[in-house]
Image (tube, rainbow, N blue to C red):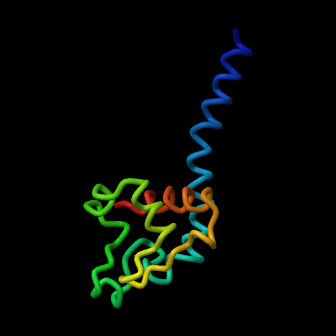
């Protein structure tokens, strides 16, 4: 019985921890690919904010976006807003990790 509880606890920690690890990996990608426009803390740079870029740390923006929409935007970009597509530069796992990290920027 004790061994079973220990195994269950280990699995639970691994499952919970995997989301945190995903966000941690996304932080590096975000810093390298996104922060130059979207800001290190998710606040859109002034030049881009004037052109309509939303801040990732805005609660209303976070609520309005699904993970799928964020991943689609990272993957395909928004050409008319000068947002590059990363489909040929990031793996699906990188995109998922970056999305998870963007979620941590909410206030």
Location of residue 75 with respect to 34 vertically, above or below: above
Residue that appears at 30% across and 66% down: 58
Q: Residue furthest right?
A: 3
Location of residue 90 with respect to 21 vertically, above or below: below
- Check the picture and name the quadrant holding the C terminus: bottom left
> Which quadrant holds residue 9?
top right
How many labels, in total? 0
Q: Residue furthest bottom?
A: 47
Location of residue 50 with respect to 9 vertically, above or below: below
Horizontal side of residue 33 vs 60, given as left or right: right
Judge by depth and name the residue closer to the eye, 1 or 85.
85
Horizontal side of residue 102 vs 44, given as left or right: right
> Which quadrant holds residue 73?
bottom left
Judge by depth and name the residue closer to the eye, 21 or 5.
21
> Which quadrant holds residue 91?
bottom right
Q: Residue 87: x and y, percent?
A: 57, 69
Residue that appears at 74% across and 15% down: 3
Q: Residue 39: x and y, percent?
A: 44, 78
Residue that appears at 60% across and 77% down: 32
Horizontal side of residue 76 vs 90, given as left or right: left
Q: Residue furthest top?
A: 1
Q: Residue 53: x and y, percent?
A: 33, 78
Residue that appears at 62% across and 35% down: 13
Q: Residue 4: x and y, percent?
A: 70, 15
- Check the picture and name the quadrant holding the N terminus: top right
């Amino acid at each position: 019985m004790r061994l079973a509880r220990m195994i269950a606890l280990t699995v639970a920690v691994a499952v919970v921890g995997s989301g945190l690890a995903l966000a941690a990996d996304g932080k590096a990608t975000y810093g390298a690919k996104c922060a130059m426009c979207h800001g290190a803390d998710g606040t859109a740079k002034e030049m881009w904010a004037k052109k309509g870029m939303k801040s990732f740390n805005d609660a209303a923006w976070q609520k309005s976006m699904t993970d799928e929409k964020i991943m689609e935007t990272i993957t395909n970009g928004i050409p008319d807003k000068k947002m590059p597509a990363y489909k040929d530069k990031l793996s699906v796992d990188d995109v998922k990790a970056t999305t998870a990290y963007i979620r941590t920027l909410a206030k």
